[in-house]
Image (tube, rainbow, N blue to C red):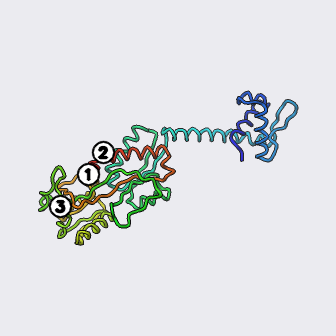
Amino acid sequence: MIEARHLRVLRAVASTGSFSAAGRELGCTQPAVSQQMKALESSVGTPLLVRTGREMRLTQAGEALVRHAAGIIAGLTAAEEEVAAIAGLRAGRVRLVSFPSGSSALVPTALAALRAAHPGTRVSLEEAEPPNSVELLREGDCDVALAFRYEDAAGAEEWDDLVVRPLLSDRLVALVPEGHRLARTARADGAGSVAIGELARESWIAGCPRCRGQLVEVCEGAGFTPRIDFATDDYPAVVGLVGAGLGVAVLPQLAVDSVRPRGVRTVALEPAVRREIVALTLPDLAQVPAVAATLDELTRAGARQPAAR
């Protein structure tokens, strides 16, 4: 194993012509230079210097090593500077994966704050729903994953191997057309609520697959199976279908906040159903300054969401 400190000594000896002169250049003693040269020769298994009186002459192997040493030392110096920049948040990259409503409601605020505080840190964004986003994290394809899980849901994911940063608790709300019989229940202060059983005979518009599964589970818990006439992963489409009077829907409040609901009213459900929104990363990645800063900004963004209040 060739050590960088030994290469620096070799270059100094080659440029100055003696151990004593190399010691003065490096700020160490002549015996220390001699010991490091012996250690280097032992590592490579061949002499690097020929000592003739007071002069030092490089062997062929020594000349080859000095020739490569310049590039090696330059590369190490560049690496040290780059690592120092990343550690000091003057540089760095974070690969973020988020589900759609998180991308629109949480990510912009968090990344704008991160860029203002640490302009050298770059964040890339891709979208994926959990559990796919969590698998991307575990497989090393991202550094931070925004995910959610429903409270008391059967088969909730286990995240014991991950660092879990809670962002907010997001309540499910019912969406009904403005002219719906339950629209008058909706109040600006959010105090109005309905039991989900009151929607048992309605046509339903379902959202993403996980939200769809949660809808069926909640409805069955209330004693009925929803008749789903339309299903779409696109939240604005869900709102549009409800606004056109084609049915009712249940969506997370964060998803509703991420679109401009027109022609619909939102009504709180009883009993309350919530999903926990979190940012996830691996334990080792949590120690990386850029990742830690991203988690901090996502936490602040979550605390500012109306859904969190």
State the residue at coordinates (17%, 66%): 198
- Check disc 2 and report the residue beneath it: 304
Q: Which residue is outermost to the right? A: 53
Contact, mark 2 vs mark 3 (Cβ under 8 Å): no
Q: Amino acid at mark 2?
A: Arg
Residue 2 sits in which quadrant?
top right
Name the secondary structure under disc 2. Answer: loop
User: Label 2 to label 3, Cα distance in Å?
Assistant: 27 Å
Name the secondary structure under disc 1. Answer: helix
Q: Which mark is residue 44?
A: none
Q: Of the residues tagged 2 and 3, which is closer to the observer?
A: 3
* Crowd band around label 1 with a 10 angstrom C-alpha radius: few (<14), some (14–19), many (20+): some
Relative to residue 215, is residue 254 depicted above or below?
A: above
User: Label 2 to label 1, Cα distance in Å?
Assistant: 13 Å
User: Label 3 to label 1, Cα distance in Å?
Assistant: 20 Å
Q: Nearer the viewer, residue 35 or 24?
A: 35
Q: Amino acid at mark 3?
A: Val
Q: Amino acid at mark 1?
A: Asp
Tell me where residue 33 appears, x and y as whole percent: 76, 34
Name the secondary structure under disc 3. Answer: strand
- Residue 122 shown left or right of residue 305 in the figure: right
- Check disc 3 and report the residue beneath it: 194
Residue 227 sits in which quadrant?
bottom left
First reached walking from the N terminus: tag 3 or tag 1 = 3
Tell me where residue 261 appears, x and y as whole percent: 21, 54
Tell me where residue 187 appears, x and y as whole percent: 15, 52
- Check disc 1 and report the residue beneath it: 257
Relative to residue 28, is residue 240 depicted above or below?
A: below
